[in-house]
């Protein structure tokens, strides 16, 4: 009888995939401390009961970690990759004043590696546990000859919900409103094609410790937005500062309005080494410039927000519709 081909000798090991799913189930249990799935984990789809809401609105996001994945793999920071994946989606959910409820991941590899995948899922589970969000499922795809050896593809998907009358109303933003910032942990997961180019062309300037510092995980602003909800402070707008920098992301909140902002010094020596190799304008349109989250608030709420969030600082104010967003250092 001729040699018969199998899925495994074609490069896909379904038995190992089943083992990894078992590993994930153990990590996932930690993410259901506050919210629980309606039915058992592991079905073809995940269900969540919204009957406790008066008028629920579903909020969804999808994101990844971009080219930051390459140095994260190079420096064996797999847990950070998992945290970044969660942060990029959950932060977007939070801008609507919604609660993140369920998260799903997609992991694509050339060959299954139980340890490496387990470490990424561990980082995902740690971040989700902190955000009271369920790891509801996902997909781990083994794709030989499609994903290059050693590389890992990551995508994250989050589902949240909010009461309809508690959603952020960006239309309420008007001239004179304050613009408040919260610091980032660094470059987060955006602008890494430029960052990697800077570090590769000037490798002698960056120590391993400095590179690891630059690879710090994306900050998740769940604690801060939770405090605002607990204190019944509803901003007029919130922006997650990702690719495109402050101007592009803040414009989503301001609509046709302009703004005048003055940034605080970005006091990070490793960051400043990177910024020395690009123009200020290019840095502004690529990086968060030390501000990972922006809140737009009416005058009556400014002091309340500053008191509630010790790291918050006023960046500037909203201006007329005829003006642009001006950001200065």
Image (spheres, rainbow, N blue to C red):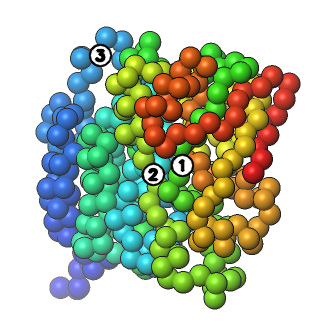
Tell which of 153 and 300 is nearer to you: 300
How far from the left and from the top, in percent, is residue 303?
Answer: 53, 26
Q: Separation of disc 1 and disc 3 at Cα?
A: 32 Å
Please name the residue that numbered disc 2 is placed on: 219
Q: CA distance from mark 2 to mark 3?
A: 28 Å
Res. 193 image quadrant? bottom right
Residue 146 seen = no
Identity of the residue drawn at 31% across and 42% down? 131
Which quadrant, please, contains the N terminus? Answer: bottom left
Residue 249 lies, with reference to residue 126, above or below; the image says above
Q: What residue appears at the point 62 percent right and 36 percent down from the top-left corner?
A: 314
Q: Nearer the viewer, mark 1 or mark 3?
A: 1
Residue 309 showing in the rendered view: yes
Viewed as shown, does residue 185 lie left or right of 9?
Answer: right
Q: Are marks 1 and 2 in contact (CB under 8 Å)?
A: yes
Q: Is residue 24 above or below residue 200?
A: above
Alpha-carbon neighbours of circle 3 within 10 Å: few (<14), some, or many (≥20)?
few
For marks 2 and 3 on the same chain, the one whose residue lies earlier in the sequence: 3
Q: Residue 67: horizontal and vertical position, in percent?
A: 55, 65
The correct choice, above or below, for 83 with respect to 200 in the image is: above
Distance from Cα at disc 1 to Cα at disc 2: 9 Å
Q: Residue furthest bottom?
A: 204
Query: Foreground mark, 1 or 2?
Result: 1
Left/right placement of residue 327 relative to residue 211 reads right
Point 53% across, 68% down: residue: 214
Q: Is residue 243 above or below residue 46?
A: below
Label 1, on which residue? 183
């Amino acid at each position: 009888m001729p040699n018969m081909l199998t899925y495994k000798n074609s490069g896909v090991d379904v038995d190992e995939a089943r083992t990894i799913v078992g590993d994930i189930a153990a990590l996932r249990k930690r993410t259901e401390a506050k919210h629980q799935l309606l039915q058992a984990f592991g079905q073809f789809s995940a269900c969540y009961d919204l009957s406790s809401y008066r008028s629920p609105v579903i909020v969804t996001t999808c994101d990844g970690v971009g080219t930051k994945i390459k140095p994260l793999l190079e420096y064996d920071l797999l847990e950070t990759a998992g945290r970044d994946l969660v942060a990029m989606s959950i932060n977007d959910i939070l801008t609507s004043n919604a609660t993140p409820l369920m998260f799903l991941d997609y992991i694509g590899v050339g060959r299954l590696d139980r340890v490496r995948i387990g470490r990424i899922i561990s980082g995902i589970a740690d971040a989700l546990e902190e955000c009271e969000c369920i790891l509801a499922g996902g997909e781990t795809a083994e794709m030989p000859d499609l994903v290059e050896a050693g590389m890992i593809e990551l995508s994250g998907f989050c589902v949240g919900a909010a009461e309809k009358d508690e959603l952020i109303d960006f239309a309420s933003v008007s001239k004179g409103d304050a613009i408040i910032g919260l610091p980032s942990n660094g470059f987060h997961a955006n602008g890494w094609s430029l960052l990697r180019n800077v570090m590769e062309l000037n490798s002698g300037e960056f120590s391993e410790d400095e590179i690891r510092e630059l690879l710090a995980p994306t900050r998740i602003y769940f604690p801060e937005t939770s405090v605002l909800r607990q204190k019944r402070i509803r901003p007029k707008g919130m922006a997650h500062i990702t690719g495109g920098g402050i101007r592009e992301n803040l414009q989503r909140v301001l609509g046709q309005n302009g703004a005048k902002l003055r940034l605080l010094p970005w006091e990070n020596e490793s960051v400043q080494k990177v910024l020395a190799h690009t123009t200020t304008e290019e840095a502004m349109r690529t990086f968060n410039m030390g501000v990972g989250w922006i809140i737009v608030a009416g005058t009556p709420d400014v002091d309340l927000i500053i008191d509630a969030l010790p790291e918050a600082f006023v960046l500037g104010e909203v201006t007329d519709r005829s003006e642009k967003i001006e950001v200065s250092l």
